[in-house]
Image (cartoon, grey):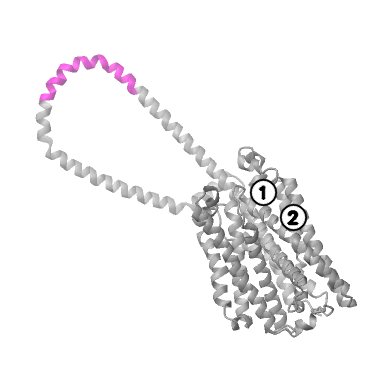
Amino acid sequence: MYTFSSKIKNLALILMVLGALGIGYGFFSAPKDIEEVEKILASGHGEHHEAKAEEHKVAEVKHEAEAKHVETKQESTDSTVANELDSVAATVEATHSTEDTHSTETANVTEEVKHTSEVKHEVAEVNEHNEHQEHAQHVLGQLKNKPWAALYVGALFIFLISLGVLAFYAIQWAAQAGWSPVLFRVMESITSYVVPGGIILYVILVLSGMGMNHLFIWMDKDIVAHDEIMQGKAGYLNVPFFLIRAAIFLGGWIFYRMYTRKNSLALDETGDLTFYKKNFKASAAFLAFFLVSESMMSWDWVMSVDPHWYSTLFGWYVFASFFVSGITVIALITLHLKSNGYLEHVNNSHFHDLAKFMFGISVFWTYLWFSQFMLMWYSNIPEEVTYFKTRIEHFNLPFFGMVAMNFLFPVLILINTDFKRVPWIITMAGIIILSGHYLDFHNMIYPATVGDQWFIGIPEISSVCFFVGLFLFVVFTTLSKAPLLAKGNPLIEESKHFHY
């Protein structure tokens, strides 16, 4: 039996407390009105104003130089002009009387022109002020969304890690895999987070539907009323149906997890293979449900923050991201338990297979990322390419940085067969993969909800800390509630002696 380490328990509690404080600070420090936004914009654009001032100085120097040049040229032509003026003077004198009769009319016209110019100038100032107010109001909405986006990304990413492990666990049962039963208790413990994580996530979705935030712009009736595209999708993208779908997804996933866990423990206690067959059938049915529900979940919870954009690859893309993250977490927790004297039957071949999945799914994710990006960028269809244009312009570093973290580094680190058996190399690769895929979800959510007002600060870090702390507490608590070896599984002996 595993004993919950006091070090991990204290770490989990500290992370949750610090995370909760940071999340609260994020909401508290978010601007409440236009005046606060004006101050933020002024401080944030100080360098921009200084650059503009320098440009004005350069323009003034250039203007003075041109004036001096004109003055020199004027002196050289003064004599010629003087002669011409003498001849013109006579003509002017002759027409002076005529001009007097028109002077009054000219003055009136001049006054009208001056008045019109002043009106135009006032209108321009009003328009400029209105544009500035609209921009400030837009920035206010983005900055109010920022703590919500940080909370949502943290909650979603950690929850999907447990969901990815649940899918991997179901695949092992349905495939009747012989190498993995010694890892079943680790997988079952990680999937226990599906319950509290799913409830928290559902609460955030309900709050979004109640108008507490603007993560999903299609939930705003005023905006939908002026948007034909969102009106056309209103049959699917509406709050009641959205929440019903979320409840069905979460209910199905949680039910499968609790059902298989119960049967797995009963199999250990009784040795009755009926429980094994029940889990086999349930896993096959669950995978069919999961393929549909996961795709719809990715449309609802991730893609719909950009309601004008869609991708037929998106469901697979999101799945690959959290699937490899889940396998990575299995490897890291297994390494921790093994290094502390538990899981005596887990050997280097098990770690090799886990690292092989980390390597393979990273390549698969990259294939999906490139296929989605290259086809849309090359076709240059406005409603498709705008998704990537926004991310390249405003999220350039995290957008391309996470590609390097999710593909380049894992491939270089894990491509060697021997490296897949070295614990510190697997750990290093795992940390890079998890960090990269957090950035991946950050890039999926933030551009549509926060725009160019993004940065990874206290709310983002605190959100991750809180949910990682809760994850550790739930997972290691579950680990301590049952033996770490699934001794009743008929394939356990094969798993104990697995060698690659």
Q: Quadrant of the N terminus?
A: bottom right
Residue 91, position as x, y percentages in the image: 14, 20
Camera-near label (1 vs 2) is 2
Mark on residue 444? none
Is residue 149 at all visible to an observer of this figure?
A: yes
Q: Quadrant of the C terminus?
A: bottom right
Residue at the location (74% across, 54% down)? 246
Residue type highlighted by circle 2:
Tyr
Binning the other alpha carbons within 10 Å of mark 1 as few (below 14), some (14 to 19) or many (20 upward) gives many
> Which residue in the protein does label 2 denote?
202
Residue 272 higher or lower than 238, as above or below: below
Binning the other alpha carbons within 10 Å of mark 2 as few (below 14), some (14 to 19) or many (20 upward) gives some
Residue type highlighted by circle 1:
Asn
Is residue 427 one of those drawn in magenta?
no
Residue at the location (26% across, 16% down)? 102
The first of marks 1 and 2 along the sequence is 2
- Residue 178: name its quadrant: bottom right
Residue 347, position as x, y percentages in the image: 70, 84
- Labels 1 & 2 near each other (Cβ < 8 A): no
What element does badge 1 sit on?
Answer: loop
Residue span colored magenta: 87-110
Is residue 344 at all visible to an observer of this figure?
A: no
Residue 44, position as x, y percentages in the image: 50, 53
What element does badge 2 sit on?
Answer: helix
Residue 57, position as x, y percentages in the image: 33, 49
Using residue 174 as the reference point, say whether residue 450 is left or right of it: left
Q: Main secondary structure of the magenta part?
A: helix
- Residue 112: name its quadrant: top left
Mark on residue 213? 1
Q: Nearer the viewer, residue 195 or 465?
A: 195
Q: Nearer the viewer, residue 446 or 126?
A: 446
Q: Nearer the viewer, residue 235 or 55?
A: 235
